[in-house]
Image: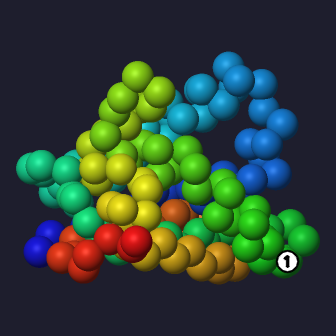
Amino acid sequence: MREYRLIIERPSPLLNQIRKMHYQKYKRLREEWAWLIKGAAMKAGVRGEPINRCIVFVSRHCNHTTGRLPDWDGLYGGLKPVLDCLSEASKSNPNGLGIIVDDSPKHIITLSAMPYLCKKEDARTEIHILETEEPPIG
């Protein structure tokens, strides 16, 4: 069973940040995250075929000016470009890196995310991917 821990030296976007983005700006954001994840994957030694079934845990470490953690919907909604980059590339997902087969419940058995407050210099996103043989939901 493969297990990867990808560390990106910036917090993942939040839903409120990407919701009203112009499509070109969102495209650039996805391209940027593809490069960040690719670099982290190389450091983590990711190689081989995409993982078919896995558990994904994302921890978002950020220094919020308000001192508050983000809402759950903002946290999970903001993971869309991150999960798209982890998935295999396709016509509708050209920034996919093929670390996992797809970001659907058939392939990601469990998706968990947790926000943390930290010092500004410690801001990061950690993506923990654990291959599993658990059968898909449904």
| Label 1 CA crowd tier, 10 Å (few <14, some 14–19, many 20+) | few
Hey, what amino acid is under mark 1? Gly
Depicted 62 relative to depicted 103: above or below: below
Residue visible at 86% across and 66% down in the picture? 65
Q: Is residue 130 left or right of residue 80?
A: left
What residue did someone put label 1 on?
67
Residue visible at 11% across and 74% down in the picture? 1
* Residue 42, percent from left and from top: 22, 49
Depicted 70 relative to depicted 103: above or below: below
Q: Quadrant of residue 8?
A: bottom left
* Residue 55, percent from left and from top: 35, 74
* Residue 101, percent from left and from top: 28, 50
- Along the line of sight, which residue is nearer the eye, 66 or 22? 22
* Residue 136, percent from left and from top: 32, 71
The residue positioned farthest toward the right in the image shown: 66
Q: Is residue 11 left or right of residue 39?
A: right
Q: Quadrant of residue 138?
A: bottom left
Residue 128 seen anywhere in this rendered image of the structure: no
Residue 104 seen anywhere in this rendered image of the structure: yes
Numbered disc total: 1
